[in-house]
Amino acid sequence: MVRRQFTREQKLQIVREVLETGSASMVARRHDIRDSIVSRWVRKFKELGEGAFDNARRGVEGREPAEYRALATENERLKRLLGEKDLEIAILRDLVKKRSTITTGGYTSLSKKGSTAEAMNRSRE
């Protein structure tokens, strides 16, 4: 099936046919539309009434397309910023790990009895 755009009036007519006949699949076949789409229109009509198809060209959650694009752009910017911060943290952790290995003389684990300095003194003996 080819993707088509239906006007508000066409959608209302199809929904009224479904409500009269009681068969969404039969009406869908007659208009060459998937029955899931017709059922969605009927559900929307029952929830919102005749105003269900007034904002057919709106984006996610009834937002205008321009507002949706602005939010998507900001979301991408914030994701990039978060990725940069995660990378900074990973680099700093590696640096701290390398520094602690250098200052402890290669000893990375502590003994149960004492500190790193005590472990180093014991290794020199």
Image (tube, rainbow, N blue to C red):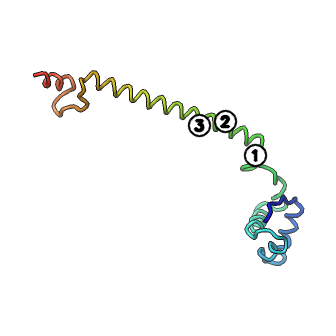
Circles 1, 3 touching at the beta carbon (< 8 Å):
no
Direction from residue 11 to residue 102 in the image, left or right: left
- Which mark, residue 63? 1
Direction from residue 77 to residue 103 in the image, left or right: left
Quarter of the view holding residue 13: bottom right
Where 80 sits versus 4, above or below? Answer: above
User: Gap between marks 1 and 3, in whole Å?
Assistant: 21 Å
- Which mark, residue 79? 3
Q: Give the residue type at disc 3.
A: Lys
Report helix, strand or loop for mark 3: helix
Image x and y of residue 48, in percent? 78, 60
Image x and y of residue 5, in percent? 84, 58
Report helix, strand or loop for mark 1: loop
Image x and y of residue 119, in percent? 17, 26
Image x and y of residue 56, in percent? 81, 54
Q: Give the residue type at disc 2.
A: Glu
Q: Name the residue under label 2.
A: 74
> In the depicted view, which residue is nearer to us: 22 or 79?
79
Q: Residue at x 80, y 68 (%)?
A: 33
Q: Which residue is drawn at 80% across and 63% down?
A: 2
Which one is earlier in the sequence, the residue at label 1 or at label 3?
Answer: 1
